[in-house]
Image (cartoon, rainbow, N blue to C red):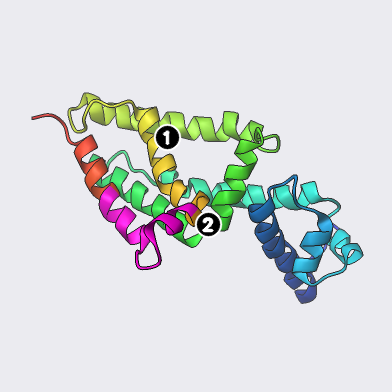
C-alpha cells in the first residue's frame, strides 16, 4: 500500500480486521505459534489480500506492539510528582488492574513477546521504557526521602505492581479455575491490592 495515500473506508476496515484478528491469534499462540494463514482466516480475508495490507507476520506484530506500548505506558506517565504519593501510586495500581480486565489479550501479547526475549522491542525496553521507569522511580524516591512513603525500593515497587496486576490477565484461566465462577477475580483483587499497597506504602510512625 502507498504509505502516503489516504486509506479508503474498506482499507481502514480491513486493516482493523487484520489487527483485531492478529491480536487474538498472537495472544493465544504467541508469535512463533501464529501464522499468516491463521490471521487471514480469523480476519475473513484471503492470504493474498492480507499481504496487500501487511508484507509479513512481523509487520503485523510490530504494528500491534507499537500501538500497545503507547497505551500500556500511559498510566505510568500519569503519576504526578505534585500529587499525594499514596493516591498517585494507588491510582496507578487500579488503572493497571483495570487494563488487565479490559485488555487481557494485549497483556498476553506483551507478556509473550517478553518471554521470547523481546526481540522486536528490545530497543524500547532499554530505551523509552527504562527512561520512563527511571523518571518515576526518582519521583518515588523523592517522596520516600521526604518521609511521605515507607522506605521501599522504587523499582521493585513498580515491578511488583506490574506482576500483581497483569497476573490476572496473563494467567486468567488459572485464576478463574481456582476461584470458581462465583467469584469476580478483578473486584476481589482490587480490594486486596488496595489493602496490601496501602500498608506497604505507609511510613512507619
Residue 159 is labelled as 1
x and y, in percent, of residue 94 in the image: 34, 53
Q: How many residues crowd around disc 2 within 10 Å: few (fewer than 14), some, or many (20 or more)?
A: some
Q: Nearer the viewer, residue 23 or 183?
A: 183
Secondary structure, mark 1, is helix
Per the rendered image, the range of residues in magenta is: 174-192
Q: Quadrant of the N terminus?
A: bottom right
Secondary structure, mark 2, is helix
Q: Is residue 77 above or below residue 60?
A: above
Seen at 70% across and 61% down, the residue is 19
Q: Quadrant of the C terminus?
A: top left
Magenta segment main secondary structure: helix
Q: Magenta stretch: residue 3 in it?
A: no
Seen at 81% across and 64% down, the residue is 40
Is 158 left, or right, of 128 in this rendering? left
Residue 104 is labelled as 2
Residue located farthest toward the left when viewing the structure as drawn: 205
x and y, in percent, of residue 180 in the image: 39, 62
Amino acid at each position: 500500500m502507498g504509505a502516503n495515500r489516504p486509506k479508503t473506508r474498506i482499507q481502514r476496515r480491513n486493516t482493523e480486521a487484520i489487527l483485531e484478528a492478529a491480536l487474538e491469534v498472537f495472544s493465544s499462540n504467541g508469535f512463533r505459534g501464529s501464522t499468516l494463514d491463521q490471521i487471514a482466516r480469523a480476519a475473513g480475508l484471503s492470504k493474498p489480500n492480507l499481504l496487500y495490507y501487511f508484507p509479513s507476520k512481523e509487520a503485523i506484530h510490530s504494528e500491534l506492539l507499537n500501538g500497545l506500548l503507547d497505551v500500556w505506558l500511559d498510566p505510568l506517565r500519569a503519576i504526578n510528582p505534585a500529587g499525594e504519593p499514596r493516591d498517585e501510586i494507588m491510582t496507578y495500581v487500579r488503572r493497571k488492574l483495570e487494563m488487565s480486565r479490559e485488555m487481557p489479550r494485549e497483556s498476553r501479547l506483551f507478556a509473550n513477546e517478553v518471554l521470547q526475549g523481546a526481540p522486536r522491542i528490545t530497543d524500547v525496553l532499554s530505551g523509552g521504557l527504562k527512561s520512563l521507569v527511571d523518571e518515576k522511580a526518582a519521583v518515588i524516591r523523592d517522596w520516600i526521602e521526604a518521609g511521605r512513603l515507607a522506605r521501599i525500593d522504587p523499582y521493585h515497587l513498580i515491578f511488583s505492581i506490574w506482576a500483581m496486576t497483569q497476573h490476572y490477565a496473563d494467567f486468567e484461566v488459572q485464576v478463574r479455575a481456582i476461584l470458581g465462577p462465583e467469584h469476580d477475580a478483578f473486584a476481589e483483587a482490587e480490594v486486596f491490592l488496595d489493602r496490601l499497597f496501602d500498608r506497604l506504602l505507609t511510613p512507619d510512625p
